[in-house]
Image: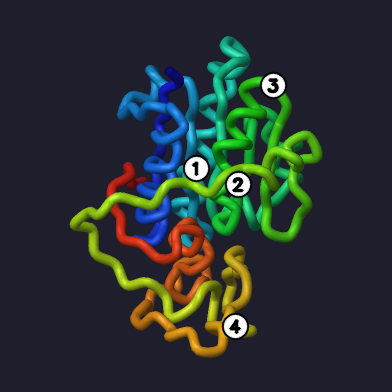
């Protein structure tokens, strides 16, 4: 059984996404560990708002280069806003990275992991980029993940998926995409005042894949 070390950076919505990712991957047979050294798979769920958090991520990935060279089967993945913002060029710049997964594509993570493990090739699923060709047929046929568990973690879901705010002076890109109004007759969800990653409350991640959920946990950076 492959063991995953998952570290979370950024806002509460990233913490929610990380718990949902953990639930999803456990359902696919993976186990989780708090030990970086014991992990077969290392995932960083990232945020692109604060430079300090970004520098921590780059430092962690850089420090893994010797270990990756010594153990090529180690899988290193970057999830979330930094993956979406930096995109495919990041795979060429930091070749120890095996996969990228944007916040709106987290439901594809099991397929990306499975393919990276079986082929040794870099994988990616990003909102504005076609998925890695080798995984495309697998991604389209992948079943939806199981619903998240009920926990005590409290957060306010966004009024609707995506980022509502679009200020020209904002230094933050919107990796979760533009806001999406509810369908006719659909009651919009209330709450959500967190603008981390320019996402107007954090819509677009696994929360929307699951149809809105509550979660928590994840190791925070």
Callout in the foreground (4, 1): 4
Horizontal side, residue 196 vs residue 155: left or right: right
Q: Real-space Cα distance between discs 4 and 3?
A: 39 Å
Callout in the foreground (4, 3): 3
Q: Nearer the viewer, residue 45 or 118?
A: 118
126 w.r.t. 199: above or below = above
Residue hosting label 3 = 120
Task: Classify the position of the N terminus by image quarter.
Answer: top left
Residue 186 position, x and y percent, is 48, 84
Q: Real-space Cα distance between discs 2 and 4?
A: 23 Å
Residue hosting label 2 = 101
Residue 193 position, x and y percent, is 37, 79
Could you say which disc has been placed on residue 166 in the image?
A: 4
Residue 50 position, x and y percent, is 47, 60
Cβ–Cβ under 8 Å for marks 4 and 3: no
Residue located 43% across and 27% down the image? 29
Of label 2 and label 1, which has the lower sequence position? Answer: 1
Question: Crowding at label 1, few (<14), some or many (≥20) Cα neighbours within 10 Å?
Answer: many
Q: Real-space Cα distance between discs 2 and 1?
A: 15 Å
Callout in the foreground (3, 1): 3
Q: Real-space Cα distance between discs 3 and 2?
A: 16 Å
């Amino acid at each position: 059984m492959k063991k995953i070390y998952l570290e979370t950076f950024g806002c509460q919505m990233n913490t929610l996404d990380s718990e949902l990712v953990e639930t999803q991957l456990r359902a696919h047979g993976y186990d989780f560990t708090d030990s970086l050294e014991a992990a077969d798979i290392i995932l960083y769920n990232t945020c692109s708002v604060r430079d300090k958090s970004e520098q921590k991520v780059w430092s962690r990935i850089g420090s893994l280069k010797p270990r990756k060279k010594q153990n090529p089967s180690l899988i290193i993945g970057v999830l979330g806003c930094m993956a979406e913002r930096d995109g495919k060029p990041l795979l060429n710049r930091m070749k120890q990275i095996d996969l990228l997964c944007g916040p709106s594509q987290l439901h594809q993570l099991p397929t990306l992991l499975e393919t990276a493990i079986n082929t040794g090739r870099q994988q990616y699923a990003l909102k504005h980029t076609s998925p890695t060709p080798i995984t495309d047929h697998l991604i389209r046929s992948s079943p939806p993940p199981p619903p998240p568990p009920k926990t005590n973690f409290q957060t306010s879901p966004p009024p609707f998926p995506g980022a509502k705010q679009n200020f020209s002076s904002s230094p933050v890109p919107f990796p979760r995409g533009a806001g999406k109004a509810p369908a006719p007759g659909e009651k919009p969800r209330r709450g959500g005042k967190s603008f981390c990653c320019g996402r107007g409350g954090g819509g677009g991640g696994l929360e929307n894949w699951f149809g809105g959920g509550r979660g928590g946990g994840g190791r925070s950076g």
